Amino acid sequence: MLGGAIKNKFPAFVISFIKLKKIVTTGKRDQGTTPVMIDSVTKKPFINIATFETVNYIKVKKQKLNKSDSKGLLALMSLKVGDWTILFKVPGYVDQKIIVSIAASEVTKMVVEMVAVV
């Protein structure tokens, strides 16, 4: 979009636009998602076994993967602005893929109810 004649005539504008676009899409460190994974029947969180990971993360980088702690809490997964497909897993439960929209400088909170495999 900003190539060719525009880039040649207004290089400072093109460089500034690219920097601004990077700032908007990258956001801040306190941006991403903090899900809570609970059993659909007991409503209790999973301790040390629940995981969630991005499915559509950039192929050249490591997959983002988080695991629940001793209190059943999941840490913030920092993500760039946009839509992300996140896969939630707990042994003995049906895996769930959920699309989450991340906005600049916001933490998206969600509760994921996991259903036991019958």
Image (cartoon, rainbow, N blue to C red):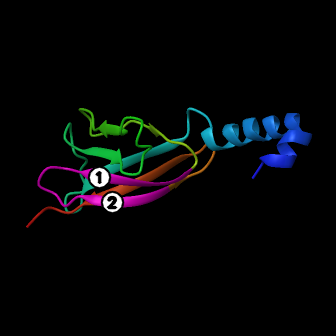
Say which of 110 and 12 sits in front: 12
Q: Is residue 94 magenta?
A: yes
Magenta stretch prevailing secondary structure: strand
Q: Secondary structure at mark 2?
A: strand
Number of numbered callouts drawn: 2
Residue at the image position 79 percent from the left and 35 percent from the top: 15
Q: Residue at x 59, y 45 (%)?
A: 106
Choose the circle earlier in sequence order: 1 or 2: 1
Task: Please say if 114 is above or below 36.
Answer: below
Q: Which residue is mark 1?
A: 88
Residue 109: percent from the left, percent from the top? 47, 50
CA distance for labels 1 and 2: 6 Å
- Residue 8, image x and y in percent? 86, 40
Q: Position of residue 91 (x, y in %)?
A: 14, 50
Residues tagged 1 and 2 counted as in contact (Cβ below 8 A): yes
**Which residue is at a point 35% across and 48% down the rendered structure image?**
36
Q: Toward the viewer: 88 or 61?
A: 61
Q: Under tag 1, what secondary structure?
A: strand
Q: Which residues are magenta?
A: 82-100
Q: Amino acid at mark 2?
A: Lys
The reply, left or right, for residue 15 in relation to residue 73 is right
Q: Is residue 52 left or right of residue 110?
A: left
Establish if 61 lies above or below 113.
Answer: above
> Which residue is label 2 attached to?
97
Residue occupying image coordinates x 33% and y 45%: 53
Question: Which amino acid, mark 1?
Answer: Phe
Residue at the extreme bottom of the image, as rendered = 118
Residue 72 occupies quadrant? top left
Whether the magenta-drawn stretch holds residue 108 is answered as no
Which quarter of the rendering shows the C terminus?
bottom left
